[in-house]
């Protein structure tokens, strides 16, 4: 009898929610002394992660939130592979090199057969490397001319935060050409007054963080040709194609934003954005070997192999790069185009419907020639509505939709916008469900106004 009761208790213990672990409040500050049952801890963590919200309804992120079964299988297969161990995993290194070759071809590098580039953990690392190469090239040229090198500056439009990091970490003055009402990107005319002999180069963004629009790379190149003629400064461009680098070649092949321009010396992109690989994948490529200064390359003798490395990080998962190769093969150019074009269709549908739903003015509406599949809107000036976009974002979240509101950078800081990134997996059906909730939200505010307890600014931190 006693024996039976013990057995029943043991059985109950086998069930996760009968276990002692399931009754625990998970420790937050100290590693527990003893081990626990893996399944039970897994379940508790899974449950805790529900609070993060649903990534597929995160319409703010540029990054992939959908993965097919094959991607999951490859990620699982590669869980033990370190990207940096080229000597131990030569086939993984070979696959990385194939990706770099394919991108050199995709971005029209003049030496596509012998490309100079690498995978990285994402665009931030890739931009950092592109920026460093630019900085070192400038230093060399200045030294050769017998001129000082202590006051470098970098000229950009409204950039992603990684460029602010780059400038601060390497003590370079960041000259972000401010926006103006009606001009939300850099233009040649706006750029010119910021250039001088200490400018290490210009960054153009293909898919601006704030709106999704492309900056005019070709126009900037032409303006810099003029500058060289007039002042003798030979300024190069790094294209931050974090998202556009994997969109424009498929959806706007005639847009010459890439190495077709001799002034474009380096390009970076995130594989984990519109490259459709899972998180942890970016690339940076240079036009020519001469554009990547030798000092940035390290030759490491690592477990019997001579390896040239030019990354900031050492160990890094190989899975995302292998999945990048899988996607390039699996989809081909036509597949990428199809997926991204579907996203544009969704973006355009959303733009139309949002415009119809109230006093919303679209600043960007998902045009393949002008930007990535995204849309950005603001409230009409003087709109008589009982809410602002921070309230609106907050209320949309009630149904799980994450569409943060944020203010634009200088000199448009009074403009508050909301932006949606349309990624694979956000099709017309999901978009229609979103629009229904959008209309409900407009109606809700029309009926109830903004409650006392809704705060404004605090509700919407900006998400890069
Ligand atoms: C996302 C993004 C970055 C940073 O890329 P990560 O891959 O997240 O490191 C840099 N620049 C632009 C324009 C971006 O959109």
Image (spheres, rainbow, N blue to C red):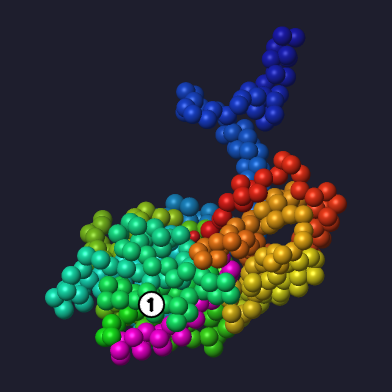
Quadrant housing residue 381: bottom right
Q: Where 105 falls versus 419 (above or below)?
A: below
Percent across and percent down for residue 79 are 48, 52
- The magenta segment is 209-230
Q: Where 187 falls versus 124 (above or below)?
A: below
Task: Please give left or right for residue 18 compared with residue 196 in the image.
Answer: right
Which of the two residues, 360 or 212, is positioned nearer the viewer here?
360
Write down the residue under mark 1: 193
Instruction: Name which residue lies at 48% across and 63% down.
Output: 160
Task: Please give left or right for residue 121 compared with residue 456 in the image.
Answer: left
Which of the two residues, 338 or 268, is positioned nearer the viewer here?
268
Task: Please give left or right for residue 241 compared with residue 337 in the image.
Answer: left
Percent across and percent down for residue 97 are 39, 71
Identity of the residue furthest to the top in this view: 2
Quadrant housing residue 117: bottom left
Which of the two residues, 334 or 80, is positioned nearer the viewer here?
334
For the N terminus, which image quadrant?
A: top right
Total labels: the figure holds: 1
Q: Where 364 falls versus 28 (above or below)?
A: below
- As for residue 250 lying within the magenta part, the answer is no
Percent across and percent down for residue 161 are 46, 60
Percent across and percent down for residue 331 are 59, 74
């Amino acid at each position: 009898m006693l024996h039976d009761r013990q057995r029943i208790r043991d059985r109950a213990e086998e069930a996760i929610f009968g276990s002692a672990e399931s009754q625990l409040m998970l420790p937050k500050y100290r590693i527990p002394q003893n081990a626990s049952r893996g399944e039970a801890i897994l379940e508790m963590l899974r449950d805790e992660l529900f609070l993060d919200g649903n990534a597929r309804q995160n319409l703010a992120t540029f990054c992939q939130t959908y993965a097919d079964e094959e991607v999951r299988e490859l990620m699982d297969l590669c869980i033990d592979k370190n990207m940096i161990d080229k000597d131990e995993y030569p086939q993984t290194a070979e696959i990385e090199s194939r990706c770099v070759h394919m991108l050199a071809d995709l971005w029209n590098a003049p030496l596509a057969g012998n490309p100079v580039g690498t995978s990285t953990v994402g665009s931030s690392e890739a931009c950092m490397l592109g920026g460093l190469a630019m900085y070192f090239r400038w230093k060399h040229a200045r030294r050769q001319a017998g001129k000082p090198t202590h006051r470098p500056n970098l000229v950009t439009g409204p950039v992603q935060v990684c460029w602010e990091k780059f400038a601060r970490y390497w003590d370079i003055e960041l000259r972000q050409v401010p926006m103006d009402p009606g001009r939300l990107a850099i233009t040649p005319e706006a750029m010119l007054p910021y250039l001088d002999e200490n400018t290490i180069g210009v960054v153009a963004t293909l898919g601006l963080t704030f709106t999704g629009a492309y900056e005019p790379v070709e126009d900037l190149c032409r303006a810099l040709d003029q500058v060289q003629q007039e002042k003798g400064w030979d300024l190069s461009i790094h294209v931050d194609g974090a998202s556009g680098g994997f969109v424009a070649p498929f959806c706007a092949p005639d847009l010459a934003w890439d190495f077709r321009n001799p002034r474009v010396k380096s390009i970076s992109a995130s594989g984990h954005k519109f490259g459709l690989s899972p998180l942890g994948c970016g690339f940076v490529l240079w036009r020519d070997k001469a554009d990547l200064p030798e000092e940035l390359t390290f030759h490491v003798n690592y477990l019997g192999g001579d390896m040239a490395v030019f990354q900031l990080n050492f160990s890094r998962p190989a899975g995302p790069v292998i999945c990048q190769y899988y996607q390039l093969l699996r989809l081909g150019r036509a597949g990428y185009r199809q997926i991204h074009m579907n996203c544009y269709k969704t973006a355009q549908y959303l733009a139309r419907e949002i415009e119809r739903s109230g006093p919303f003015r679209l600043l960007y509406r998902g045009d393949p020639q002008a930007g990535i599949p995204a849309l950005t809107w603001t409230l009409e000036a003087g709109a008589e509505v009982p809410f602002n976009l921070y309230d609106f974002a907050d209320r949309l979240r009630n149904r799980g939709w994450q569409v943060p509101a944020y203010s634009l950078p200088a000199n448009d800081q009074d403009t508050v916008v909301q932006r949606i990134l349309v990624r694979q997996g956000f099709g017309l059906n999901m978009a229609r469900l979103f629009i229904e909730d959008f209309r409900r939200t407009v109606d809700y505010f029309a009926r109830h106004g903004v409650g006392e307890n809704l705060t404004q600014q605090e509700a919407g931190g900006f998400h890069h």
